[in-house]
Image: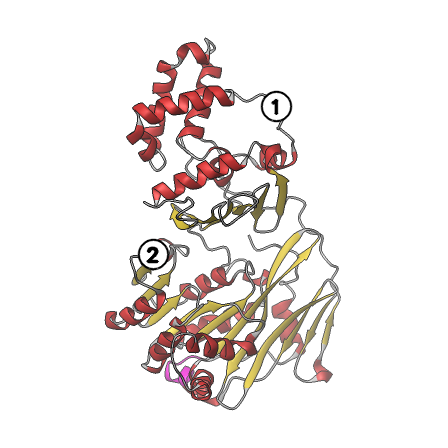
Amino acid sequence: MRIIKSENPEKAVVVNEPLKEPKKSFVPSFDFGKKSPVVEALTKDELVDFLTTDISGMEKPVSDDRLDAIRDDITTYYSKEVLDGLTDDTIRVNLVETVLKQYKAILGSDTKKAREKAEYIVRECVGTGVIEKILLDDRITDIGWNGKLLSVKTNDNKWIVEGEKVGITQKYMDQVVSKYAVANDLEINDGNPIFNGMFKNLRISATYQTNAPTGTTVAMRVARPRLALDRENFHHFAPDYMLEFFEKVVRTKSNIVISGETGTGKTEFQKLLLSFIDPIDRIVMIEDVQETHAQILFPDKDIFSWVTGNGLSISDLVSQSLRNEPRYIIVAETRDKEAYEMLKAILSGHSVITTLHAIDCRAIPRRFVNMCASGYDINEESVESDINRYFDFGCHIKSVKVDGKTIRYLNEVVEFNQNETVTLFKQKFVRGEFICEVGGELSEKFRERMHERFIEFEFPTEPEEIEDQTDDSVLLEVVE
């Protein structure tokens, strides 16, 4: 059953709808895209088998001792190729041929098996081995290592397995992290125990064993250039009339803050909002690492894509953006004193869309005040007043687990005003049901801004209208 509420209790609607069973397959079919000539992605069944089968006692294509000896040779005589091969598949293909020729006696006379062994050797020596193989699967979003256990996460599922059961040891993970560090011109060791970097579409954060007593810990986040949330599947996230609402408030050049816990889909929702920005409006996209791939997703938009580093912080880049005639300043995540620079940008007439961690929408202004105060001596009461006056909307996203599936949904939308914060939309998940509430109306001040641009929007008020627009958004279809 799905319950739809309106502001008028007499107009509440009860829609009888059976709770749908989640799809048995944990993800939809997909296109792997271009394969590496050396490493082939695991199929869906192979991925599940890999994560649920104990291979610790199984024989490897090449013994560890022999692999170490060959690795020493390759590193000594082909050092440049080993470094370049991490990012160049052509070099890897050539190294496979080299291994086939140089170690013919070791690989055996069976041509097919010899090639499989050579590819395994190159993958382990040059690439990142089984981690690389897992990451080729488009469903994977996160990989973690706590010194003993490997965690693998998709959009709607997560496995935690003992590393040794899937052939992963602490020594192996140290080698993987070291390769990623080298690719970033960095080191990770006793003197440099923290490594944060990017490799292709992978964000890596590692803490070395000197500060992690049970072994080096690693967190990897995959950032693929795609829209996980779009027009086609939005009704799984919120009712369709909210899609129209967001499109129109973005066209009105609104300032929008998205809050939620880690993993609720804040970045994906931010990318959807970005898609509504007029192509003629310049966008400055600011990130710690290139995670949104905004220029790839929206090649026709005027996007300046910037990342922090080389001594420049998000705060520095927000300040720099003001000299580049932006209409929109998009900060992937606000965490610190850059909040004050963003507020100044809003006060100077620019529009901002950002994300942050907050318990709900009404906590957003105070979170911003605290972040501003972390780097500047401010009058907190005055700053909070400015935030409530000039920030337009707060959106809070939540996720729930149902039968092992992760469902992400729009929990709340509020309009900030100097005197009060008004709830415009609320969606709750109660005992297997979504309950939607249409709240207050848009302020007259914001309506005037919409009318200046010939934009109209009204929330549905009649029960039949609410039912018609929401009955497709029932529930257990995981955002693909």
* Residues at marks 1 and 2, CA–CA distance in whole angstroms: 45 Å
> Of callouts 1 and 2, which one flags the residue occurring earlier in the amino acid sequence?
1
Q: Secondary structure at mark 2?
A: helix
Determine which residue is flagged by label 1: 58
Spot occupied by residue 357 in the image (x, y as percentages of width and height): 52, 68
Type of the residue with mark 1: Met
Q: Residue 382 falls in which quadrant of the image?
A: bottom left
Answer few, some or many: residues within 10 Å of disc 2's Cα (few below 14, many 20 plus, some between 14 and 19). some
The residue located at (75%, 59%) in the rendering is 18
Q: Describe residue 159's horizontal placement relative to residue 385 as left or right.
A: right
Which mark, by number, is residue 299? none
- Residue 65 lies within the magenta run: no
- Residue 452 lies within the magenta run: yes
Spot occupied by residue 14 in the image (x, y as percentages of width and height): 74, 72
Task: Decide which of 447, 396 is in the foreground and name it.
Answer: 396
Answer few, some or many: residues within 10 Å of disc 1's Cα (few below 14, many 20 plus, some between 14 and 19). few
Residue furthest to the bottom: 419
Which mark, by number, is residue 295? 2
Magenta region: 449-455
Q: Secondary structure at mark 1?
A: loop
Spot occupied by residue 449 in the image (x, y as percentages of width and height): 40, 84
